[in-house]
Amino acid sequence: MCSLLCGPLAWSAAAAGEQRDSQPRDVPSLMTMMAKVASREDPFTETKTVAMLIRPLVLKGTLAYTRPDRVEKHVLQPYEEHLVVQGDHLTLSNQEGTKRIAVKSHPLIWSFVEAIRASLAGEVAVLRQLYHIKFQSTEAGWTLTLRPLDRQAAEHLTSITLTGHGDHLNTVDIREAGGDRSLMQIHEPTS
């Protein structure tokens, strides 16, 4: 379930090129950098390793973020799907139709969504409310690992690990308790 919802949501943006050269030294400085990003759209490649599948599923598409709370994942290959989270609403459209849910009415989904949205928005207080946070930073980049505080969430989700450089998110690695994994690589546009 998390790889369906979190993987698509997991993305951030770069604001000014000069910020990309500096690394945050702690969680508050990372959140300050992320909070300055107004919007961004980047291509992604996501590899989902699911126990039920013989081989990994590789998705390609675009990921967009607009402050304060809009995240869009548009899968273009190997099928077409559009997922939008804005405010408390999640909308998923594909060949089977469109489904809408109120995120906060589903505590587990809400927890997953907030891990990504709060990271993108720079809302460290929200992250601390829901997750154990581990942060590492080197000249090469930073790593933010989130582990759920809620026991119900921990039954489904082992961790979400975000890596990046400056204010750009490079990867999102979602590991589920059952062994499934989603690894999303966010590519900078080649313009």
Image (cartoon, helix red, strand yellow):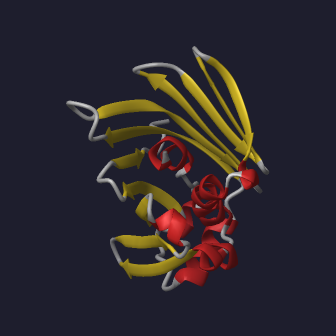
Relative to 124, is 164 above or below?
above
Relative to 39, is 72 above or below?
above
Instruction: Give residue 171's quadrant in the image.
Output: bottom left
Instruction: Give residue 79's quadrant in the image.
Output: top left
The percent position of residue 82, horizontal first and vertical second, equals: 61, 28
Q: Residue shown at 62%/34% (left/top)?
A: 83
Q: Residue shown at 69%/66% (left/top)?
A: 36
Asked whether the viewer can see residue 20, the reply is no
Report whether 45 appears left or right of 43.
Answer: left
Relative to 97, is 91 above or below?
below
Q: Residue shown at 52%/63% (left/top)?
A: 153
Q: Nearer the viewer, residue 156 or 5?
A: 156
Q: Residue shown at 53%/76% (left/top)?
A: 149
Relative to 1, is 55 above or below?
above
Q: Nearer the viewer, residue 85 or 36?
A: 85
Query: Which residue is farthest left?
Result: 54
